[in-house]
Image (spheres, rainbow, N blue to C red):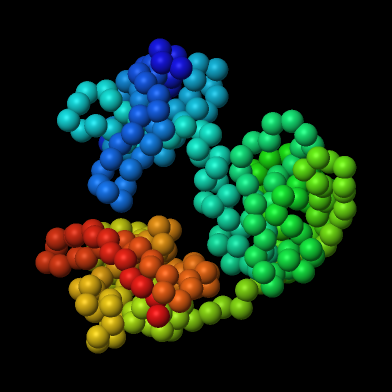
Amino acid sequence: MPGETVIAIGNPLGLQHTVTTGVVSAIDRTLEFDSDHVYSGLIQTDASINPGNSGGPLLNALGELIGINTAIRGDAQNIGFAIPVDRLTELLPVMLDIERLRQVDFGMHFDGKPRRGGPKGVRVARVDADTPAARAKIQPGDLLTSIDNQPTHDYIEAFSLLERTPIGQTLKLSLASEDGRSKRTVEVPLAEIPRQDASRIMKRLFGIELREMNKADLELIGINRSIGLVVTTITPGSEANRQGLAPGDIITKFGGISVSDLATLAHLTKQVQHNDRIPFQLLRIRDDNAVRFETALESQ
């Protein structure tokens, strides 16, 4: 609530493990950067937040996480903003999707919202067709209560167990109806996805061929890890060609998700349908100048 004491932790300007304090200045703030980037429902605080604090926690006086530091007003003093933790819990199933992170065929996607009352478990939000979860007859609305007899009271517990499970192993999943009256156990394998040629798929869908960043690319930019995929060729007459994409551009995000290797991109392209319009974020480096830009391309 406004006036509540808060603590921000982060690495402002590279100064690691910095702690600042303040109060909640207001809640439910909206920041509009442009027509495509609007943040709403933010917590405003006067706890000092600087570049490097983003992604760090905003805590209350009890040390409980209430938000993730996100943005500042550069033309003001001590006006910072944080994403409320409730919003974070809704986003976690997307950010920590086990299929995307581990390149496995599972088919079950979760709802990250905490449950109020009823049996404890993680609600199944979606089941993809023709996947191990679908073949096990798991339905949206089912509650996952345990994995291999380990309780899954919330999404983080479920993710932790799935993240540690060896690929190829069959899991014993305990499920219940939302009212807890119906219970059953099914077996679902965490199946490996055959490696796909993401560059070939991107050429077919968007007229773009890609490769992963190599040592020379990293040295040119002055970084030590990959931040994207390098465009090698653009098909003449393609939309990518008309939009001005060029060899040497670096695709850093595909559909709003960071891509630094072809395996991640291959998983994302599986979800693209004909005529989908996909947003791209790119980095163009020319003559020691770096320009970040965005565009959207329609799949073929």
The answer, for residue 209, to whether it is visible in the render is no
Q: In which image quadrant can residue 172 be found? A: bottom right
In the image, taking residue 174 as reference, residue 77 lies left or right, namely left
Q: Residue furthest bottom?
A: 236
In the rendered view, tell whether residue 68 sits above or below residue 227.
above
The answer, for residue 87, to whether it is visible in the render is yes
From the viewer's side, name the closer residue of 160 and 188. 188
Q: Residue furthest left?
A: 287
Expressed as whole percent of the image width and height from the top left, the position of residue 16 reads 37, 34
Expressed as whole percent of the image width and height from the top left, the position of residue 17 reads 41, 31
In the image, taking residue 279 as reference, residue 74 lies left or right, namely left
Residue at 82% from the left image edge and 47% from the top image edge: 176
Q: Quadrant of the C terminus?
A: bottom left
From the viewer's side, name the closer residue of 193 and 129. 129
In the rendered view, tell whether residue 183 sits above or below residue 68.
below
Q: In which image quadrant can residue 251 be found? A: bottom left
Expressed as whole percent of the image width and height from the top left, the position of residue 229 reads 36, 70
Residue at 45% from the left image edge and 81% from the top image edge: 201
In the rendered view, tell whether residue 26 sits above or below residue 137.
above
In the rendered view, tell whether residue 230 sits above or below residue 170.
below
Q: Residue furthest top?
A: 3
Residue at 77% from the left image edge and 43% from the top image edge: 178
In the image, taking residue 149 as reference, residue 103 lies left or right, namely left
Expressed as whole percent of the image width and height from the top left, the position of residue 157 reads 69, 43
In the image, taking residue 298 as reference, residue 98 lies left or right, namely right
